[in-house]
Amino acid sequence: MKRISLTQYLIEEQRLHNNIPAELRLLLEVVARACKTISHAVGKGALGEVLGTAQSENVQGEVQKKLDIISNDILLEANEWGGHLAAMASEEMETIHPIPNRYPMGEYLLLFDPLDGSSNIDVNVSIGTIFSVLKAADGMQAPTEADFLQPGSKQVVAGYAVYGPQTVLVLTTGNGVQCFTLDREMGSWVMTQRDMQIPADTKEFAINASNARHWHPPVKRYVDEMLAGTTGPRAKDFNMRWIASMVADVHRILNRGGIFMYPADAREPDKPGKLRLMYEANPMAFIVEQAGGAATDGQQRILDIQPEKLHQRVPVFLGSKNEVELVTSYHKAK
Ligand code: AHM
Ligand code: MG
């Protein structure tokens, strides 16, 4: 079977389909290269002295792992000088990172969760990088946080890498979802799946069930009905998976369907869920919708949410369309 590289795919998107400008293509190549570098660091593990905790906390008060910081630095350094970006924002940085004056300024904004699934770093379980690209407003001079506060429907690209048994890169430019596998010997990304599609129905769900006692009634009802099996209202058995790396859970769903949930719960009314809108929910929602799935916060489409803060959190329900619609309808019926 003839396989094409990421570069060839992106050039075809630019030239044949007129779907991405050259600047965006080059930006994506840089992000993909940075993911390759992170994959290499992850693969070294203890031998590279990259495991364990750093002596710092991020803006959300979470203790940072060494790999959180290393991955953030790799993405910043790789993307600073290319001339395609105006600024970057990261889950690991308090505020935005404008492109330094010594480099030309481009028209795109890059957002990332440099190392998703941090709790899995030290135990050799799949982790990843999530990224999202927005276009800066025309004529923008000095980028500010406000320039980033665009709804997810404005994303021009979203993608993630999974550092697992294989390293894969999954991305959408708004024209379907493609998966590339890193050929470690050649150092190149090779397309291994074209136009990924999430089945509308599923018998698999993903949620951190240890929080069940805090769930709001619509989530509790939805999960209880699945757990009731063949004699319950859903009249079928469901299976559960929870990797605790969103990238890996979403990757499974893109491959064989399922629903992923990280709901708000009764503990912290001011903190709607754990996941961040700009770095996790929006890029994953864009990818999932492009693969025929759905993504809501329980009430509305995630991509329609107007962000108010860079580090805003949202409840997340995404994956197989019919399941996401069902749990969303339970929220609306409440
Ligand atoms: P992180 O970006 O700090 O790694 O946190 C996000 C991760 C997701 O990848 C995953 O779905 C979730 O946190 C797991 O949370 P929990 O530990 O509550 O199960
Ligand atoms: Mg994360």
Image: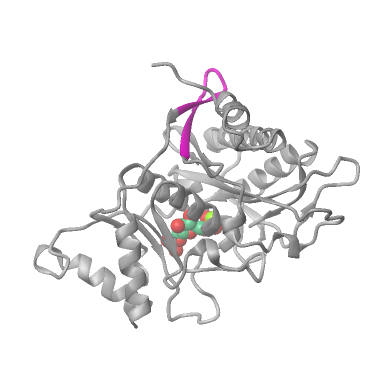
Quadrant assignment, res 259: bottom left
Overall secondary structure of the magenta section: strand
Q: Is residue 234 among what the camera can see?
A: yes
Please provide percent x and percent y for residue 54: 64, 53
Figure disc tally? 0
Please provide percent x and percent y for residue 201: 26, 54
Please provide percent x and percent y for residue 221: 27, 75
Q: Is 290 on the left-hand or right-hand side of 95?
A: left
Which quarter shows the N terminus?
top left
* Nearer to us in this view, 218 or 71: 218
Residue lying furthest right: 102
Which quarter shows the C terminus?
bottom left
Q: Is residue 117 among what the camera can see?
A: no
Residue 318, above or below 129: below
Whether the magenta-drawn stretch holds residue 185 is answered as yes
Give the magenta-colored segment's residue range. Answer: 177-191
Whether the magenta-drawn stretch holds residue 127 is answered as no
Residue lying furthest left: 231
Please provide percent x and percent y for residue 52: 57, 49
Residue 294, above or below 188: below
Quadrant assignment, res 217: bottom left
* Nearer to us in this view, 153 or 128: 153
Q: Is 104 on the left-hand or right-hand side of 76?
A: right
* Nearer to us in this view, 136 or 123: 136
Q: Residue at x 49, y 52 (%)?
A: 284
Q: Residue at x 49, y 47 (%)?
A: 122
